Amino acid sequence: MADLAVGHRPAARLIPIKMRIVFYDRTPVDYTPETPFSRPLGGSESAQCYLAIELARRGHSVVLITNTSVPGRYLGVDCSNHHDQGTRAVLNSAHVIIASNESLGRSLKDPQCRIAGLPRAVSAGAMV
């Protein structure tokens, strides 16, 4: 009965949630998740590649939107170019958007948002 001391609750059972996570980087750097393993890349770009790979390995749906010249699937991560026509749909389908190397939160929340010529991409509730 000592386990039921005041303020102690039995551990809740965690249910894994699979999320659709989008990393969004509009810098001119051309890269995919494989790039940091083959050539030098900036610190934030490398870090998001490593994180994207690990999240995909854990079963999440992960998309990396960059200035890549070779869209495709790399190490479990879907990659596309931020100029692609499908960018809006990808952003709208995300549970989480991680904007890298520039402040995009305010513009993504703005009803008059125009990112790369796209109309409002996500609702404020989807921003983290």
Image (tube, rainbow, N blue to C red):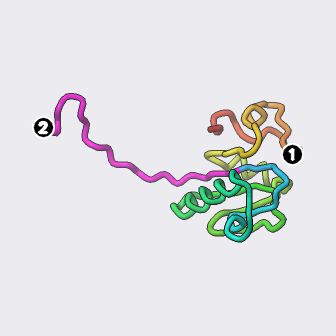
- The numbered disc on residue 2 is 2
Q: Secondary structure at mark 1?
A: loop
Is 86 on the left or on the right of 73, as rendered? Answer: right
- In magenta stretch: residue 19: yes
Magenta span covers which residues? 1-23
Residue under the image location 68 percent in, 57 percent down: 46
Chief SS of the magenta region:
loop
Label located before the other in sequence (2 or 1): 2
The image shows residue 101, relative to residue 70, as above or below, that is: above
Picture coordinates of residue 12, whole percent (x, y): 32, 44
Residue at the disc numbered 1: 116
Which amino acid does the dot numbered 1 rest on? Ala
Quarter assignment of residue 51: bottom right
Is 9 on the left or on the right of 79, as rendered? Answer: left
Judging depth in this view, the residue of 45 and 68 nearest the camera is: 45
Q: Secondary structure at mark 2?
A: helix
Judging depth in this view, the residue of 80 and 33 nearest the camera is: 33
Residue under the image location 77 percent in, 62 percent down: 31
Residue under the image location 60 percent in, 62 percent down: 53
Residue under the image location 63 percent in, 34 percent down: 125
Picture coordinates of residue 44, whole percent (x, y): 69, 51
Which amino acid does the dot numbered 2 rest on? Ala
Mark 2 and mark 1: span between their CA atoms? Answer: 60 Å
Picture coordinates of residue 50, whole percent (x, y): 61, 59
Picture coordinates of residue 64, whole percent (x, y): 71, 57
Quadrant where the N terminus lies? Answer: top left
The image shows residue 13, relative to residue 103, as above or below, that is: below
Extreme left residue here? 1
Is 11 on the left or on the right of 76, as rendered? Answer: left
**Circle 2 or circle 1, nearest the eye:** 2
